[in-house]
Image (cartoon, grey):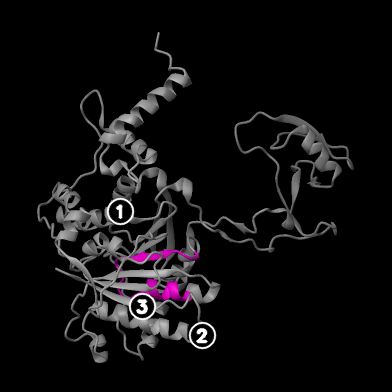
Amino acid sequence: MPDLPAPLEEQSDTAAALLHVLASHAPAELRNDRGEVDPEALCCALEILAEQQSPTGEGYSFSWPGKQQAQQIASPAQLQQQSRLCRADGAAFQPATPLDHHALIVGDNLFGLAHYEHLTSEQPEVIYIDPPYNTGGSMVYADSFHDKRRARGTEPVGKHASWLSLMLPRLRLARDILADNGVIYVSIDDTEVAQLRLVMDELFGVRNHLATFVWETKRAARGVPPKHLVMTNHEYVLAYAKHASHFQFRGVEREIDGFHNPDEDPRGPWRSESMKATDRRSNVFTITDPVTGRRYTGNWAFTQETLTAMIADNRVVFPADPQGTPRQKKFFDSYRNPRKAFVTQLGWYSTEAATKALQRQFDGVRVFDFPKPQALLQFLLKQATDNGIVLDFFAGSGSTAEAVVACNAADGGNRRAVLMQQPEILPADAAARQLGLETISDITRARFERCLAVSNSDRSGTGAWPLQVYEITY
Protein backbone atom coordinates (compact mmCIF):
# COMPACT_ATOMS: atom_id res chain seq x y z
CA MET A 1 0.00 0.00 0.00
CA PRO A 2 1.50 3.39 -0.99
CA ASP A 3 2.33 5.90 1.72
CA LEU A 4 -0.38 8.46 2.30
CA PRO A 5 0.57 12.13 2.09
CA ALA A 6 1.33 13.79 5.39
CA PRO A 7 -1.44 15.89 6.98
CA LEU A 8 -1.48 19.55 5.96
CA GLU A 9 -0.22 20.61 9.40
CA GLU A 10 2.87 18.41 9.02
CA GLN A 11 3.43 19.58 5.45
CA SER A 12 3.31 23.19 6.64
CA ASP A 13 5.86 22.47 9.39
CA THR A 14 8.14 20.77 6.86
CA ALA A 15 7.90 23.73 4.47
CA ALA A 16 8.70 26.16 7.28
CA ALA A 17 11.70 24.08 8.31
CA LEU A 18 12.93 23.97 4.69
CA LEU A 19 12.66 27.74 4.33
CA HIS A 20 14.54 28.18 7.59
CA VAL A 21 17.44 26.09 6.26
CA LEU A 22 17.39 27.81 2.88
CA ALA A 23 17.39 31.24 4.51
CA SER A 24 21.11 30.87 5.23
CA HIS A 25 22.18 28.44 2.50
CA ALA A 26 20.19 29.30 -0.65
CA PRO A 27 22.23 30.57 -3.62
CA ALA A 28 21.63 34.05 -5.01
CA GLU A 29 19.57 32.63 -7.89
CA LEU A 30 16.88 31.58 -5.38
CA ARG A 31 16.66 34.93 -3.63
CA ASN A 32 14.70 38.09 -4.35
CA ASP A 33 16.02 41.63 -4.19
CA ARG A 34 15.54 41.70 -0.41
CA GLY A 35 17.72 38.61 0.04
CA GLU A 36 14.74 36.42 0.97
CA VAL A 37 14.11 32.99 -0.54
CA ASP A 38 11.86 33.44 -3.57
CA PRO A 39 9.17 30.70 -3.56
CA GLU A 40 8.63 30.94 -7.31
CA ALA A 41 12.34 30.58 -8.07
CA LEU A 42 12.51 27.67 -5.64
CA CYS A 43 9.57 25.91 -7.32
CA CYS A 44 11.17 26.42 -10.72
CA ALA A 45 14.48 24.97 -9.49
CA LEU A 46 12.71 21.95 -7.99
CA GLU A 47 10.84 21.36 -11.25
CA ILE A 48 14.11 21.39 -13.19
CA LEU A 49 15.66 19.03 -10.63
CA ALA A 50 12.70 16.63 -10.95
CA GLU A 51 13.03 16.65 -14.74
CA GLN A 52 16.72 15.80 -14.47
CA GLN A 53 16.12 12.78 -12.26
CA SER A 54 15.19 9.46 -13.78
CA PRO A 55 15.78 5.76 -12.98
CA THR A 56 18.19 5.54 -15.94
CA GLY A 57 20.16 8.61 -14.96
CA GLU A 58 18.91 10.46 -18.02
CA GLY A 59 17.32 13.86 -17.75
CA TYR A 60 16.47 17.10 -19.47
CA SER A 61 19.00 19.91 -19.56
CA PHE A 62 19.60 23.05 -21.60
CA SER A 63 23.26 23.68 -22.27
CA TRP A 64 25.71 24.94 -24.88
CA PRO A 65 29.47 25.48 -25.20
CA GLY A 66 30.33 28.58 -23.17
CA LYS A 67 27.30 28.56 -20.87
CA GLN A 68 29.31 28.16 -17.69
CA GLN A 69 31.59 31.05 -18.63
CA ALA A 70 28.56 33.20 -19.52
CA GLN A 71 27.04 32.49 -16.09
CA GLN A 72 30.24 33.41 -14.31
CA ILE A 73 30.60 36.86 -15.87
CA ALA A 74 27.12 37.94 -14.67
CA SER A 75 28.63 39.25 -11.43
CA PRO A 76 27.82 42.93 -10.72
CA ALA A 77 30.64 43.19 -8.17
CA GLN A 78 33.30 41.95 -10.58
CA LEU A 79 31.98 44.06 -13.46
CA GLN A 80 31.92 47.15 -11.24
CA GLN A 81 35.56 46.54 -10.31
CA GLN A 82 36.49 46.56 -14.00
CA SER A 83 34.63 49.76 -14.95
CA ARG A 84 33.07 53.03 -13.80
CA LEU A 85 29.86 54.89 -14.57
CA CYS A 86 30.60 58.57 -15.24
CA ARG A 87 28.61 61.51 -16.49
CA ALA A 88 29.63 62.40 -20.02
CA ASP A 89 30.14 66.03 -18.98
CA GLY A 90 32.50 65.00 -16.17
CA ALA A 91 30.26 66.29 -13.38
CA ALA A 92 29.93 64.36 -10.13
CA PHE A 93 26.60 62.71 -9.39
CA GLN A 94 24.78 60.65 -6.80
CA PRO A 95 22.16 57.94 -7.40
CA ALA A 96 18.77 59.62 -7.82
CA THR A 97 15.70 58.05 -6.24
CA PRO A 98 13.25 58.52 -7.73
CA LEU A 99 15.09 59.05 -11.00
CA ASP A 100 14.50 62.66 -12.04
CA HIS A 101 15.71 62.49 -15.65
CA HIS A 102 16.00 60.33 -18.72
CA ALA A 103 19.37 58.61 -19.05
CA LEU A 104 21.52 57.32 -21.88
CA ILE A 105 24.47 55.13 -20.86
CA VAL A 106 27.06 54.83 -23.62
CA GLY A 107 29.05 51.63 -23.33
CA ASP A 108 28.77 47.86 -23.19
CA ASN A 109 25.40 47.04 -21.69
CA LEU A 110 26.89 44.23 -19.59
CA PHE A 111 28.73 46.87 -17.56
CA GLY A 112 25.83 49.30 -17.83
CA LEU A 113 23.49 46.81 -16.17
CA ALA A 114 26.03 46.15 -13.44
CA HIS A 115 26.19 49.90 -12.72
CA TYR A 116 22.43 50.50 -12.82
CA GLU A 117 22.34 50.79 -9.02
CA HIS A 118 24.80 53.68 -9.24
CA LEU A 119 22.30 55.54 -11.42
CA THR A 120 19.26 54.96 -9.23
CA SER A 121 17.85 52.49 -6.72
CA GLU A 122 14.43 52.84 -8.39
CA GLN A 123 13.88 49.57 -10.23
CA PRO A 124 12.49 49.58 -13.78
CA GLU A 125 8.86 48.55 -14.16
CA VAL A 126 9.39 47.75 -17.83
CA ILE A 127 12.36 46.39 -19.72
CA TYR A 128 12.10 46.33 -23.50
CA ILE A 129 14.97 45.11 -25.65
CA ASP A 130 15.46 44.47 -29.34
CA PRO A 131 18.67 42.41 -29.27
CA PRO A 132 20.68 41.15 -32.26
CA TYR A 133 18.62 38.55 -34.12
CA ASN A 134 21.71 36.49 -35.01
CA THR A 135 20.89 36.55 -38.71
CA GLY A 136 24.49 36.71 -39.84
CA GLY A 137 25.85 40.11 -38.79
CA SER A 138 28.54 40.61 -36.18
CA MET A 139 27.75 41.24 -32.52
CA VAL A 140 30.01 43.99 -31.19
CA TYR A 141 30.33 43.25 -27.47
CA ALA A 142 33.27 42.66 -25.18
CA ASP A 143 32.51 39.03 -24.43
CA SER A 144 33.21 36.51 -27.20
CA PHE A 145 32.09 32.89 -27.15
CA HIS A 146 32.17 31.91 -30.81
CA ASP A 147 32.57 28.17 -31.38
CA LYS A 148 33.01 26.78 -34.89
CA ARG A 149 32.35 23.15 -34.00
CA ARG A 150 29.36 21.47 -35.60
CA ALA A 151 26.63 19.47 -33.92
CA ARG A 152 25.34 16.35 -35.68
CA GLY A 153 26.77 17.51 -39.00
CA THR A 154 24.39 20.47 -39.33
CA GLU A 155 25.30 24.06 -38.53
CA PRO A 156 28.13 25.51 -36.44
CA VAL A 157 27.54 25.13 -32.72
CA GLY A 158 28.55 28.78 -32.36
CA LYS A 159 25.59 30.03 -34.38
CA HIS A 160 23.36 29.65 -31.34
CA ALA A 161 25.96 29.22 -28.59
CA SER A 162 27.63 32.60 -29.04
CA TRP A 163 24.23 34.33 -29.16
CA LEU A 164 23.05 32.56 -26.02
CA SER A 165 26.28 33.43 -24.24
CA LEU A 166 25.74 37.05 -25.21
CA MET A 167 22.18 37.06 -23.89
CA LEU A 168 22.42 34.96 -20.73
CA PRO A 169 24.48 37.26 -18.47
CA ARG A 170 22.62 40.36 -19.62
CA LEU A 171 19.21 38.81 -19.07
CA ARG A 172 20.28 37.59 -15.64
CA LEU A 173 21.42 41.06 -14.60
CA ALA A 174 18.23 42.53 -16.06
CA ARG A 175 16.10 40.08 -14.10
CA ASP A 176 17.79 41.04 -10.87
CA ILE A 177 17.11 44.78 -11.27
CA LEU A 178 13.54 44.43 -12.63
CA ALA A 179 10.87 45.56 -10.17
CA ASP A 180 8.80 42.85 -8.47
CA ASN A 181 5.73 44.10 -10.37
CA GLY A 182 7.68 44.52 -13.57
CA VAL A 183 7.65 42.96 -17.03
CA ILE A 184 10.35 42.36 -19.63
CA TYR A 185 9.62 42.37 -23.36
CA VAL A 186 12.13 40.86 -25.81
CA SER A 187 11.75 41.26 -29.56
CA ILE A 188 12.98 38.34 -31.68
CA ASP A 189 12.39 36.48 -34.92
CA ASP A 190 12.39 32.82 -35.96
CA THR A 191 16.19 32.55 -35.90
CA GLU A 192 16.48 32.49 -32.10
CA VAL A 193 12.94 32.44 -30.71
CA ALA A 194 13.24 28.78 -29.64
CA GLN A 195 16.54 29.38 -27.83
CA LEU A 196 15.28 32.62 -26.30
CA ARG A 197 12.21 30.91 -24.88
CA LEU A 198 14.39 28.26 -23.23
CA VAL A 199 16.82 30.71 -21.66
CA MET A 200 14.00 32.99 -20.49
CA ASP A 201 12.17 30.02 -18.96
CA GLU A 202 15.37 29.10 -17.13
CA LEU A 203 16.05 32.62 -15.83
CA PHE A 204 12.53 33.90 -15.14
CA GLY A 205 10.65 30.63 -14.67
CA VAL A 206 7.97 29.07 -16.85
CA ARG A 207 5.32 30.35 -14.45
CA ASN A 208 6.29 33.93 -15.27
CA HIS A 209 5.88 33.60 -19.04
CA LEU A 210 2.99 35.94 -19.77
CA ALA A 211 2.69 35.78 -23.55
CA THR A 212 4.47 35.32 -26.84
CA PHE A 213 3.12 38.15 -28.95
CA VAL A 214 3.17 37.94 -32.73
CA TRP A 215 3.05 40.95 -35.02
CA GLU A 216 3.01 41.26 -38.79
CA THR A 217 5.89 43.09 -40.46
CA LYS A 218 4.37 43.15 -43.95
CA ARG A 219 1.08 42.35 -45.62
CA ALA A 220 2.28 40.88 -48.90
CA ALA A 221 5.20 38.89 -50.32
CA ARG A 222 7.21 41.46 -52.25
CA GLY A 223 10.65 41.43 -53.80
CA VAL A 224 12.70 38.48 -55.01
CA PRO A 225 10.79 35.22 -54.41
CA PRO A 226 12.46 33.10 -51.71
CA LYS A 227 13.72 29.60 -52.47
CA HIS A 228 10.71 27.79 -51.03
CA LEU A 229 8.19 30.40 -52.20
CA VAL A 230 7.08 31.31 -48.71
CA MET A 231 8.01 34.61 -47.09
CA THR A 232 8.05 35.20 -43.34
CA ASN A 233 6.02 38.26 -42.38
CA HIS A 234 6.01 38.13 -38.60
CA GLU A 235 8.19 38.65 -35.57
CA TYR A 236 7.70 37.95 -31.87
CA VAL A 237 7.79 39.76 -28.56
CA LEU A 238 8.25 37.48 -25.57
CA ALA A 239 6.83 38.85 -22.32
CA TYR A 240 7.87 37.63 -18.86
CA ALA A 241 6.97 38.99 -15.45
CA LYS A 242 9.36 39.18 -12.53
CA HIS A 243 6.50 37.66 -10.53
CA ALA A 244 3.37 36.81 -12.52
CA SER A 245 1.26 37.11 -9.37
CA HIS A 246 2.26 40.81 -9.10
CA PHE A 247 1.62 41.84 -12.70
CA GLN A 248 -1.37 42.39 -14.96
CA PHE A 249 -1.58 44.00 -18.39
CA ARG A 250 -3.85 47.04 -18.59
CA GLY A 251 -5.99 45.52 -21.36
CA VAL A 252 -7.75 47.42 -24.14
CA GLU A 253 -10.81 49.64 -23.98
CA ARG A 254 -14.08 47.80 -24.20
CA GLU A 255 -15.85 48.87 -27.39
CA ILE A 256 -19.61 49.16 -27.76
CA ASP A 257 -19.47 47.55 -31.20
CA GLY A 258 -21.40 44.28 -31.02
CA PHE A 259 -23.79 45.59 -28.37
CA HIS A 260 -27.33 46.38 -29.52
CA ASN A 261 -30.74 47.00 -28.02
CA PRO A 262 -33.30 45.40 -30.37
CA ASP A 263 -35.95 45.09 -27.62
CA GLU A 264 -35.37 48.64 -26.33
CA ASP A 265 -34.39 47.38 -22.91
CA PRO A 266 -34.14 50.40 -20.57
CA ARG A 267 -30.84 49.06 -19.24
CA GLY A 268 -29.22 49.90 -22.55
CA PRO A 269 -27.25 48.04 -25.25
CA TRP A 270 -26.54 44.36 -24.69
CA ARG A 271 -25.20 41.30 -26.43
CA SER A 272 -25.97 37.64 -25.89
CA GLU A 273 -23.42 35.42 -24.17
CA SER A 274 -23.36 31.75 -23.32
CA MET A 275 -24.80 30.51 -20.05
CA LYS A 276 -23.26 27.04 -20.33
CA ALA A 277 -20.73 25.93 -17.72
CA THR A 278 -17.18 26.06 -19.06
CA ASP A 279 -15.59 23.95 -16.33
CA ARG A 280 -16.24 20.41 -15.12
CA ARG A 281 -19.02 21.28 -12.73
CA SER A 282 -22.19 19.20 -12.82
CA ASN A 283 -25.02 21.69 -12.71
CA VAL A 284 -27.66 20.10 -14.93
CA PHE A 285 -31.28 21.20 -14.68
CA THR A 286 -34.14 22.39 -16.90
CA ILE A 287 -35.40 25.90 -17.52
CA THR A 288 -38.60 26.95 -19.27
CA ASP A 289 -39.32 29.71 -21.78
CA PRO A 290 -42.19 31.63 -20.14
CA VAL A 291 -43.58 32.67 -23.55
CA THR A 292 -43.47 29.42 -25.55
CA GLY A 293 -43.33 26.88 -22.73
CA ARG A 294 -40.35 25.16 -24.35
CA ARG A 295 -38.01 23.43 -21.93
CA TYR A 296 -34.22 23.47 -22.16
CA THR A 297 -31.92 21.19 -20.22
CA GLY A 298 -28.25 22.03 -19.86
CA ASN A 299 -25.20 22.16 -17.65
CA TRP A 300 -25.49 25.81 -16.67
CA ALA A 301 -22.96 28.26 -15.27
CA PHE A 302 -25.56 29.63 -12.83
CA THR A 303 -27.59 28.03 -10.07
CA GLN A 304 -31.23 27.24 -10.70
CA GLU A 305 -32.26 30.00 -8.30
CA THR A 306 -30.10 32.56 -10.10
CA LEU A 307 -31.32 31.55 -13.55
CA THR A 308 -34.96 31.70 -12.41
CA ALA A 309 -34.35 35.28 -11.23
CA MET A 310 -32.59 36.17 -14.49
CA ILE A 311 -35.55 34.88 -16.53
CA ALA A 312 -37.95 36.93 -14.42
CA ASP A 313 -35.72 39.98 -14.91
CA ASN A 314 -35.68 39.59 -18.72
CA ARG A 315 -31.98 38.80 -18.75
CA VAL A 316 -32.29 35.51 -20.63
CA VAL A 317 -32.79 35.38 -24.40
CA PHE A 318 -34.68 32.29 -25.55
CA PRO A 319 -34.14 31.12 -29.14
CA ALA A 320 -36.76 31.26 -31.87
CA ASP A 321 -35.45 27.91 -33.13
CA PRO A 322 -36.51 25.04 -30.85
CA GLN A 323 -33.07 23.48 -31.41
CA GLY A 324 -31.30 26.60 -30.21
CA THR A 325 -29.84 27.34 -26.78
CA PRO A 326 -30.89 30.07 -24.34
CA ARG A 327 -28.29 32.78 -23.77
CA GLN A 328 -27.89 35.57 -21.26
CA LYS A 329 -28.11 39.29 -21.89
CA LYS A 330 -24.83 40.97 -21.07
CA PHE A 331 -25.31 44.72 -20.80
CA PHE A 332 -22.50 47.05 -21.83
CA ASP A 333 -22.79 48.98 -18.57
CA SER A 334 -22.64 45.82 -16.45
CA TYR A 335 -18.90 45.23 -16.85
CA ARG A 336 -16.99 46.20 -13.75
CA ASN A 337 -13.82 46.78 -15.74
CA PRO A 338 -14.08 49.22 -18.66
CA ARG A 339 -11.12 47.42 -20.23
CA LYS A 340 -10.92 43.89 -21.61
CA ALA A 341 -8.31 41.30 -22.49
CA PHE A 342 -6.46 41.43 -25.79
CA VAL A 343 -5.08 38.66 -27.97
CA THR A 344 -1.44 37.79 -28.59
CA GLN A 345 -1.78 38.42 -32.35
CA LEU A 346 -1.09 42.15 -32.27
CA GLY A 347 -1.70 42.87 -35.95
CA TRP A 348 0.29 44.69 -38.61
CA TYR A 349 2.92 47.33 -37.88
CA SER A 350 4.84 48.59 -40.87
CA THR A 351 8.63 48.52 -40.50
CA GLU A 352 8.90 50.38 -43.80
CA ALA A 353 6.78 53.21 -42.43
CA ALA A 354 8.89 53.25 -39.24
CA THR A 355 12.06 53.65 -41.32
CA LYS A 356 10.56 56.56 -43.27
CA ALA A 357 9.34 58.26 -40.09
CA LEU A 358 12.84 58.09 -38.61
CA GLN A 359 14.29 59.40 -41.86
CA ARG A 360 12.03 62.46 -41.62
CA GLN A 361 13.33 63.17 -38.12
CA PHE A 362 16.86 63.34 -39.53
CA ASP A 363 16.15 65.74 -42.39
CA GLY A 364 15.65 62.99 -44.96
CA VAL A 365 18.84 61.09 -44.12
CA ARG A 366 18.36 57.35 -43.62
CA VAL A 367 20.39 56.94 -40.45
CA PHE A 368 19.07 53.52 -39.39
CA ASP A 369 17.29 50.64 -41.13
CA PHE A 370 14.08 49.07 -39.84
CA PRO A 371 13.60 50.57 -36.38
CA LYS A 372 10.72 49.07 -34.44
CA PRO A 373 7.34 50.73 -35.24
CA GLN A 374 6.32 53.35 -32.71
CA ALA A 375 2.72 52.17 -32.47
CA LEU A 376 3.90 48.71 -31.41
CA LEU A 377 6.28 50.00 -28.73
CA GLN A 378 3.80 52.51 -27.36
CA PHE A 379 1.13 49.82 -27.08
CA LEU A 380 3.48 47.57 -25.10
CA LEU A 381 4.60 50.37 -22.78
CA LYS A 382 1.08 51.56 -22.05
CA GLN A 383 0.12 48.00 -21.13
CA ALA A 384 2.66 47.97 -18.32
CA THR A 385 3.38 51.37 -16.72
CA ASP A 386 2.30 55.00 -16.45
CA ASN A 387 5.01 56.46 -14.25
CA GLY A 388 7.82 53.93 -13.96
CA ILE A 389 11.26 53.56 -15.45
CA VAL A 390 11.51 51.92 -18.88
CA LEU A 391 14.90 50.29 -19.47
CA ASP A 392 16.25 49.37 -22.90
CA PHE A 393 19.81 48.01 -22.89
CA PHE A 394 19.94 47.35 -26.65
CA ALA A 395 18.85 50.88 -27.54
CA GLY A 396 19.88 50.99 -31.21
CA SER A 397 18.37 54.04 -32.89
CA GLY A 398 16.50 55.04 -29.72
CA SER A 399 13.01 53.83 -30.65
CA THR A 400 12.19 53.12 -27.00
CA ALA A 401 13.15 56.66 -26.02
CA GLU A 402 10.77 58.10 -28.58
CA ALA A 403 8.01 55.73 -27.43
CA VAL A 404 8.44 56.79 -23.79
CA VAL A 405 8.36 60.49 -24.68
CA ALA A 406 5.33 60.01 -26.93
CA CYS A 407 3.41 58.01 -24.31
CA ASN A 408 4.03 60.68 -21.69
CA ALA A 409 2.85 63.40 -24.06
CA ALA A 410 -0.28 61.43 -24.94
CA ASP A 411 -1.49 60.38 -21.50
CA GLY A 412 0.31 62.68 -19.06
CA GLY A 413 2.45 59.86 -17.69
CA ASN A 414 5.79 60.35 -15.99
CA ARG A 415 7.71 57.44 -17.45
CA ARG A 416 11.47 57.86 -17.59
CA ALA A 417 13.67 56.09 -20.13
CA VAL A 418 17.04 54.55 -19.32
CA LEU A 419 18.84 53.51 -22.49
CA MET A 420 22.14 51.72 -22.99
CA GLN A 421 24.00 51.54 -26.28
CA GLN A 422 27.45 50.38 -27.33
CA PRO A 423 29.36 53.11 -29.21
CA GLU A 424 29.66 50.94 -32.31
CA ILE A 425 31.53 52.72 -35.10
CA LEU A 426 29.45 53.34 -38.21
CA PRO A 427 30.85 52.33 -41.62
CA ALA A 428 32.75 55.04 -43.45
CA ASP A 429 29.99 55.30 -46.07
CA ALA A 430 27.10 55.36 -43.58
CA ALA A 431 24.52 58.03 -44.42
CA ALA A 432 24.43 59.13 -40.77
CA ARG A 433 27.98 60.48 -41.12
CA GLN A 434 26.53 63.27 -43.28
CA LEU A 435 25.09 64.64 -40.03
CA GLY A 436 28.30 64.20 -38.05
CA LEU A 437 27.11 61.00 -36.39
CA GLU A 438 29.98 58.53 -36.05
CA THR A 439 28.58 55.79 -33.82
CA ILE A 440 25.25 54.09 -33.22
CA SER A 441 25.14 55.71 -29.77
CA ASP A 442 25.44 59.08 -31.52
CA ILE A 443 22.25 58.23 -33.41
CA THR A 444 20.59 57.13 -30.16
CA ARG A 445 21.44 60.41 -28.45
CA ALA A 446 20.49 62.59 -31.42
CA ARG A 447 17.08 60.95 -31.74
CA PHE A 448 16.49 61.17 -27.99
CA GLU A 449 17.32 64.89 -27.98
CA ARG A 450 15.16 65.63 -31.02
CA CYS A 451 12.15 63.84 -29.53
CA LEU A 452 12.54 65.69 -26.24
CA ALA A 453 12.89 69.03 -28.00
CA VAL A 454 9.57 68.51 -29.77
CA SER A 455 7.77 67.13 -26.71
CA ASN A 456 9.07 69.61 -24.13
CA SER A 457 8.11 72.57 -26.29
CA ASP A 458 4.48 71.53 -25.75
CA ARG A 459 4.76 70.19 -22.22
CA SER A 460 6.11 71.42 -18.92
CA GLY A 461 6.13 70.29 -15.31
CA THR A 462 7.38 67.03 -13.80
CA GLY A 463 6.83 65.14 -17.02
CA ALA A 464 9.30 67.20 -19.04
CA TRP A 465 12.27 65.14 -17.95
CA PRO A 466 15.72 66.25 -19.17
CA LEU A 467 18.24 63.86 -20.69
CA GLN A 468 21.51 63.07 -18.94
CA VAL A 469 24.22 61.14 -20.77
CA TYR A 470 26.59 58.77 -18.97
CA GLU A 471 29.61 56.76 -20.11
CA ILE A 472 31.15 53.48 -19.07
CA THR A 473 34.90 53.87 -18.61
CA TYR A 474 37.33 51.04 -18.09
Q: Position of residue 135 (x, y in %)?
A: 24, 65
Label 3 sits on residue: 467
Label 1 sits on residue: 196
Above-or-below relation of 337 to 370: above
Residue positioned most to the right = 291
Say which quadrant the N terminus sits in.
top left
Quarter-of-image position of residue 275 = top right
Amino acid tagged 1: Leu
Identify the residue at horizontal 51%, vertical 77% (top origin): 409
For the magenta stretch, what is the residue range? 386-406
**Mark 1 or 2: the one toward you:** 2
Quarter-of-image position of residue 436 = bottom left
Q: Earlier in the sequence, mark 3 or mark 1?
A: 1
Amino acid tagged 2: Asp
Q: Earlier in the sequence, mark 3 or mark 2?
A: 2
Q: Is residue 403 left or right of residue 23?
A: right
Q: Magenta includes 6?
A: no
Label 2 sits on residue: 458
Task: Answer whether residue 60 is visible to the viewer in this image.
Answer: yes
Nearest to the observer: residue 273 or residue 378: 378
Disc 3 and disc 2 in contact, CB within 8 angstroms = no
Q: Position of residue 377 (x, y in %)?
A: 43, 68
Amino acid tagged 3: Leu
